[in-house]
Amino acid sequence: MTGAFSFRLHKTDGDARRGEFSTPHGVVQTPAFMPVGTQATVKGIAPAEVRATGAEIVLGNTYHLMLRPGAERIAELGGLHKFMNWPHPILTDSGGFQVMSLSELRKLDENGVTFRSHLDGAMVSLTPERAIEVQTLLGADISMQLDECLKLPAKRDEIERAMRLSLRWAERSKKAFEATPKGRALFGIVQGGDDLALRADSARALVDTGFDGYAIGGLAVGEPQKVMLATVAQVTPLLPKECPRYLMGVGTPDDLIEAVARGIDMFDCVLPTRNGRHGTAFTRHGPINLANARHANDPRPLDAEAAHPSARDYSRAYLHHLTKANEMLGAILLSTVNLAYYQDLMAGMRAAISEGRFTDFRQATKEGWARGDIPAL
């Protein structure tokens, strides 16, 4: 166990930032990408293999873990780190995304959210206080406030209602968090949909409340990339430079580079593993669809120069076969390839920022994607 949560900003290059944060379970270099382990597992990949891709922190989900196996049970078994055999940092989402994604199964009011469990139909209450309690039982290094996340597009009055409610929940979340063991961190979540004025109001109010870090939520929920990036560009200058900035649920490799260029430090997204399970590999040549018949006789690896062996040690023909045969090994290998590529991308950005060449790195990376995959001879 290391010390209490803290963040250090080492270097900036334009608005791009290079830093690190310390947690009770280790240090994380930023910009950082967090693989999603919603139910105490990154789908299909053992924790040691997740770590071998370069990941230093993973994400777990309060809503799902409180339903199964239960936060109290996980606490009795030694906490989430021990339970899932991941001795490194963990951030837990508060369950706010499920307020949106499970909207047909919930009732929302000032006090919190009442869910009808998607597992057994039981009614479950999730308030800001309970969300903090669950995350404390799990032993999260970074906890998130409970918020309401809306799908876009939405009407302005509805966006403002959800944003104001999220601010009141933020205050309650902080009060509840102050009564928990010290050393861990609590992040507030900026809401406001695609309305830049509401986003600014939310950011300023959260900063006044005071958090260890600040997330931008409610994006990558149906809006165009240009709207997402405009929102990020509006919000980041309003957040304290001495605190980490987390863009939730994002995204594609291009999203990551563009958001780092606008001052974001942390990301999470299911895309690398979800796309891997469906036969798509992310590479420095852009995405490669292994279900495509043109790979059936291709003996080349995905990328002979890749750092991770999953991208070097298996032929495209074999990965195509696994994908077409729906073999679980194909999903595992491609998910691993994708997580490793995301971590390589983050490491490349960190090095470029440190050396003052982020703009060149951004351009060269995008040119590599634009050229596309090298065709077989």
Image: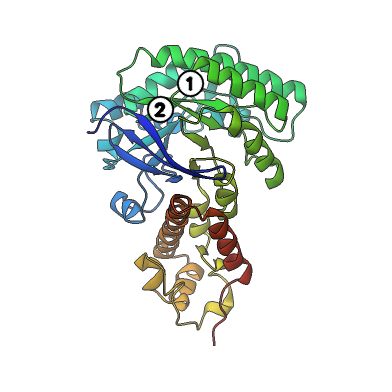
Q: Residue 41: in sight, yes or no?
A: yes
* Residue marked by disc 1: 124
Badge 2 amino acid: Met
**As drawn, is 216 to the left or to the right of 268?**
right
How many numbered dots are placed on residues in this image?
2
Residue 37: give x, y in percent of width and height. Answer: 41, 42
Whole-number angstrom distance, CA of label 1 to CA of label 2: 9 Å
* Residue marked by disc 2: 66
Name above or below for residue 126 compared with residue 150: above
Badge 1 amino acid: Val
| Residue at the (41%, 72%) spot, across then down | 305
| Residue at the (69%, 18%) spot, across then down | 161
Q: Which image quadrant: the N terminus?
A: top left
Label 2 sits on a secondary structure element that is helix
Residue closer to the observer: 65 or 256? 256
Q: Label 1: how many residues lie within 10 Å, few (<14), some (14-19) or many (20+)? A: some
Name above or below for residue 338 compared with residue 311: above
